[in-house]
Image (cartoon, rainbow, N blue to C red):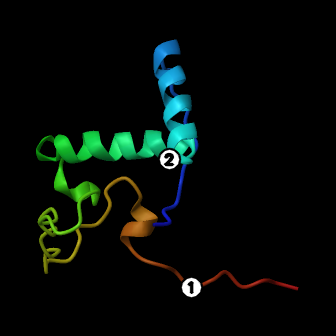
Amino acid sequence: MSRRKVTTTIYITADQDKQLKLLSQATGMPMAELIRQGIDHVLERYKDRLPTQLGLFPGLDPAPAPSAPSAQPAAPDPVDPIRAHGPTAPATRRS
């Protein structure tokens, strides 16, 4: 299973480091993979507390789609009268 990975830094206890190294040697799996599996385990356990729009859990209902934009034209911009009146003809250059 290949997933795009990002770099992050975590701090673990000396005991966690020792046990991860032993487990890595016993299983032949890199420590990073063991940590990723641990994170996956925690995310699965607490998935009911996460918003579904994150896309972390395929199969869950996504967030509702935003409503369609209004059919009414936008009001003119009171701050910028040039934009409010639209483009003007380009100035001509005199020779």
Rendered view: 72 above or below 63: below
Q: Are marks 1 and 2 in contact (CB under 8 Å)?
A: no
Q: Residue at x 47, y 15 (%)?
A: 15
Residue pointed to by mark 1: 89
Between discs 1 and 2, the one toward the N terminus? 2
Q: Nearer the viewer, residue 68 or 79?
A: 68
The reply, left or right, for residue 56 in relation to residue 52 is right
Q: Residue at x 28, y 60 (%)?
A: 55
Give the quadrant of the C terminus. Answer: bottom right
Q: Nearer the viewer, residue 71 or 14?
A: 14
Q: Nearer the viewer, residue 91 or 72?
A: 72
Q: Residue at x 58, y 38 (%)?
A: 25
Q: Mark 1 Cα within 10 Å, few/some/many (few <14, many 20+)?
A: few
Q: Amino acid at mark 2?
A: Glu
The reply, left or right, for residue 19 in relation to residue 64 is right
Kindly indicate the quadrant of the structure image that contains residue 74: bottom left
Can you tell which mark lies on residue 33?
2
**Mark 1 or mark 2, whichever is nearer to me:** 2
- Alpha carbon of mark 1 to alpha carbon of mark 2: how far? 63 Å
Q: Residue at x 43, y 45 (%)?
A: 36
Kindly indicate the quadrant of the structure image that contains residue 63: bottom left
Rendered view: 64 above or below 45: below
Residue 42 in the image, given as x and y percentages of width and height: 26, 39
Can you tell which mark lies on residue 43?
none
Q: Mark 2 Cα within 10 Å, few/some/many (few <14, many 20+)?
A: few
Residue 2 in the image, given as x and y percentages of width and height: 50, 66
Q: Nearer the viewer, residue 14 or 53?
A: 14
Residue 12 in the image, given as x and y percentages of width and height: 48, 20
Give the quadrant of the N terminus. Answer: bottom left
Q: Amino acid at mark 1?
A: Ala
